[in-house]
């Protein structure tokens, strides 16, 4: 960054965080009000304060239940999922020194898909909890395979990316084999919908777990922000600055794996958030991770909640998988970023 850009970065960060905070509150309010059964914003506010025990306003029990038990928890999980995926994208782009790195580059999404498909099609366990546990187990199986293929934390970025590609291909092949040879038409439809992402089944316990994971992961990443800044210059330069390269890389990979696996196990594989959001935030606040990570978290949260709203209203009486919406929005947005970042003649 130039000195002028460095001077503007704190102001850019403050403006971005303030704008995103307001936008996030508005997006969550709209996500809670909009649906097959539209509820006024004033009723939404009363239902939330009733749920928090701050008021005892008399509103319809149905509206209270819809707002508090269904829509608010869904909106908050969407916000946390967007924040988590954006944080993972920023971390992996620094560790791997690759602008195309994103949370699923380590094969975690493919492994989670295989675990979830094993539950849906093969009947390994029963119920939503078993589906999440199956996806989580599959995600960590993929991460363990990548760690083995890439020789743990001692390999370079390119080796790790290649290992992630190999793991993704393997687990995607396993998923396809299970679905095509052992699943029926309804199971194949359920698998496809889950693979594209959905917030339909999340509730307050999911929010509590994801909140803890996102907060702890963000705190660890911010604590190591200066080390992540050093990684962007390469392993040798980072080591020359006194950074324990292998240890930091292993910790960061583990953090991103836990965060991604938790999100995917709850809501499925949602692409483009971890790829697009870090670039958008970096364009505003610069590359320093102490500023970039909070910006990514808020921008990712706003993006995901907004995409969830679109997924519920774009087709009447039907919910479009969230991954479809993020891709449709993310591709043009990413093209704009690439166009504006092109080298000037």
Image: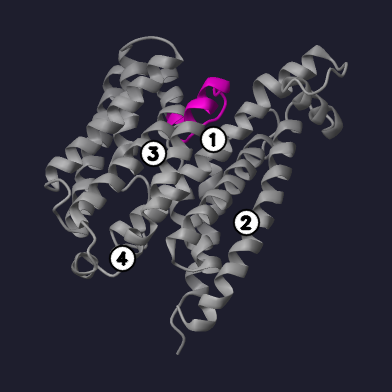
Give me the disc on residue 321: 1
Considering only vertical position in the picture, is 98 above or below 38? Answer: below
Q: Nearer the viewer, mark 2 or mark 3?
A: 2
Which residue position is annotated with label 2? 17
Mark 2–mark 3 Cα distance, whole angstroms, equals: 23 Å
Determine contact: label 1, label 3, CB under 8 Å: no
Q: Residue at x 14, y 53 (%)?
A: 154
Q: Residue at x 58, y 50 (%)?
A: 298
Mark 2–mark 1 Cα distance, whole angstroms, equals: 28 Å
Dot 1 or dot 3: first in sequence order is 3
Q: Nearer the viewer, mark 1 or mark 3?
A: 3
Quadrant of the image occupied by residue 53 = top right
Which residue position is annotated with label 3? 260
Dot 2 or dot 3: first in sequence order is 2
Q: Nearer the viewer, mark 2 or mark 1?
A: 2
Give me the disc on residue 230: 4
Mark 2–mark 4 Cα distance, whole angstroms, equals: 24 Å
Q: Residue at x 39, y 57 (%)?
A: 225
Determine contact: label 2, label 1, CB under 8 Å: no
Q: Nearer the viewer, mark 3 or mark 4?
A: 4
For the N terminus, which image quadrant? bottom left
Dot 3 or dot 4: first in sequence order is 4
Q: Which residues are magenta?
A: 192-210
């Amino acid at each position: 960054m130039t000195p002028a850009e460095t001077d503007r970065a704190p102001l850019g960060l403050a403006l971005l965080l303030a704008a995103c905070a307001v936008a996030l509150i508005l997006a969550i309010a709209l996500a809670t009000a909009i649906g097959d059964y539209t509820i006024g914003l004033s009723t939404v506010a009363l239902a939330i304060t009733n749920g928090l025990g701050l008021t005892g306003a008399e509103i319809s029990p149905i509206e209270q239940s819809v707002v508090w038990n269904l829509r608010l928890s869904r909106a908050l999980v969407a916000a946390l999922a967007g924040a988590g995926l954006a944080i993972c994208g920023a971390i992996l782009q620094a560790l791997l020194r690759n602008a195309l790195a994103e949370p699923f580059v380590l094969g975690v999404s493919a492994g989670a898909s295989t675990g979830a498909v094993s539950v849906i099609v093969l009947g390994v366990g029963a119920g939503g909890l078993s589906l999440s546990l199956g996806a989580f187990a599959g995600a960590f199986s993929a991460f363990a395979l990548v760690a083995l293929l890439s020789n743990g934390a001692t390999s370079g970025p390119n080796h790790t990316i290649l290992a992630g590609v190999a793991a993704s291909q393997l687990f995607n092949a396993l998923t396809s084999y299970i679905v095509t040879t052992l699943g029926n038409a309804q199971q194949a439809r359920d698998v496809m919908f889950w693979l594209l992402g959905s917030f339909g089944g999340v509730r307050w316990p999911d929010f509590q777990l994801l909140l803890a994971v996102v907060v702890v992961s963000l705190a660890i990443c911010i604590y190591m922000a200066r080390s992540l800044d050093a990684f962007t210059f390469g392993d040798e330069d980072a080591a020359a600055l006194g950074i324990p390269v292998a240890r930091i890389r292993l910790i960061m990979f583990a953090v991103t794996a836990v965060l991604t696996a938790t999100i995917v196990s709850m809501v499925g594989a949602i692409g483009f958030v971890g790829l697009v959001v870090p670039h958008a935030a970096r364009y505003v606040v610069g590359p320093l991770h102490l500023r970039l990570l909070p910006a990514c978290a808020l921008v990712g949260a706003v993006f995901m909640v907004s995409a969830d709203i679109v997924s519920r209203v774009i087709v009447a009486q039907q919910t479009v998988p969230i991954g479809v919406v993020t891709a449709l929005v993310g591709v043009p947005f990413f093209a704009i970023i690439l166009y504006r970042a092109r080298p000037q003649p």
